Image (cartoon, helix red, strand yellow):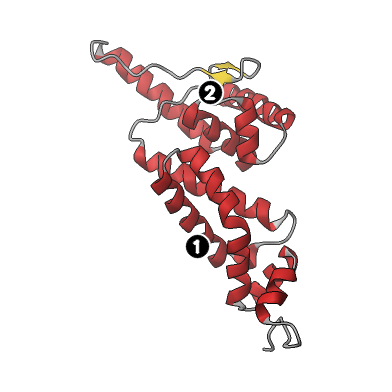
């Protein structure tokens, strides 16, 4: 198969640098490794910044970045162009960062209490060791059912909820991390809360 980038007067590097993401993705799908490398060079800094804001740990952010680009490389043929490559890659990266944090947190503190207007959701308090066994079991069951309900949310809603739960951060920062507007973030959080309350009866 001929190379996507035909040889000419311009150097390969110059061709890569003047190509848009769509052209680079098409080239990478045909096996042009340099095209994917150029995509990495273009987006890695911004993606790393997003990963660091989620994990707040440089090593975790680097691990999430590497994992995201590996997944993007492996699944590139599944990229259908309905969103920009940058948006698609950011979604993969956010999921990679959240997965790393899930593994590190043996007992995530998750809650659907609190309001969007206050720009914060309250975490359940960690169970007091003095609490009786029945109360502790009941609390654990609620957390378990809530985590399952969150997992069943559609990806767009689940991602927003999980970002919120990681650091209990502001709506504005969640919007910046997810790359969407504040209004869209508030709307998704409200929809997620409605779905979760319905799921939990």
Position of 195 relative to 92 (above/below): above
Q: Residues within 10 Å of mark 2 (few under 14, many from 20)?
A: few
Residue 13: give x, y in percent of width and height: 65, 76
Residue at 65 percent of width and 53 percent of height? 88
- Nearest the camera: 173 or 2? 173
Which image quadrant is residue 84 in? bottom right
Residue at 52 percent of width and 56 percent of height? 68
Residue 97 visible in the shown view? yes
Name the residue carrying label 2: 200
Image quarter where the N terminus lies is bottom right
Position of 102 relative to 32 (above/below): above
Q: Residues within 10 Å of mark 1 (few under 14, many from 20)?
A: few
- Nearest the camera: 148 or 31? 31
Q: Disc count in the image?
A: 2
Image quarter where the C terminus lies is top right
Residue 32: give x, y in percent of width and height: 62, 78
Residue 154 visible in the shown view? no
Residue 188 relative to residue 142: left or right: right
* Mark 1 or mark 2, earlier in chain: 1
Residue at 66 percent of width and 16 percent of height? 117
Circles 1 and 2 in contact, beta carbons < 8 Å: no
Name the residue carrying label 1: 70
Which image quadrant is residue 43 in? bottom right
Residue 15 relative to residue 44: left or right: right
- Comparing labels 1 and 2, the label whose residue is closer to the camera: 1
Position of 177 relative to 4 (above/below): above
Q: Secondary structure at mark 2?
A: helix
Outermost residue on the left side: it is 130
Mark 1 vs mark 2, CA separation in Å: 36 Å
Residue 92: give x, y in percent of width and height: 56, 52
Q: Secondary structure at mark 1?
A: helix
Residue 102: give x, y in percent of width and height: 41, 40
């Amino acid at each position: 198969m001929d190379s996507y980038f035909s040889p000419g007067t311009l150097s390969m590097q110059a061709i890569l640098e003047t190509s848009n993401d769509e052209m680079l993705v098409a080239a990478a799908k045909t096996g042009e490794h340099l095209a994917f490398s150029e995509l990495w060079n273009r987006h890695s800094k911004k993606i790393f910044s997003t990963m660091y804001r989620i994990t707040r740990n440089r090593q975790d952010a680097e691990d999430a970045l590497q994992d995201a680009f590996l997944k993007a490389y492996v699944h590139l043929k599944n990229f259908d162009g309905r969103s920009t490559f940058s948006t698609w890659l950011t979604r993969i990266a956010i999921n990679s960062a959240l997965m790393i944090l899930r593994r590190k947190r043996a007992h995530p503190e998750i809650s659907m209490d609190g309001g969007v207007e206050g720009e914060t959701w309250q975490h359940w308090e960690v169970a007091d060791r003095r609490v009786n066994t029945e109360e502790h079991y009941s609390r654990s069951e609620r957390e378990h059912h809530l985590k399952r309900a969150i997992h069943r949310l559609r990806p767009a809603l689940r991602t927003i909820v999980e970002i919120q739960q990681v650091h209990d951060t502001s709506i504005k920062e969640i919007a910046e991390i997810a790359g969407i507007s504040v209004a869209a973030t508030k709307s998704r959080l409200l929809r997620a809360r409605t779905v979760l309350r319905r799921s939990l009866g």
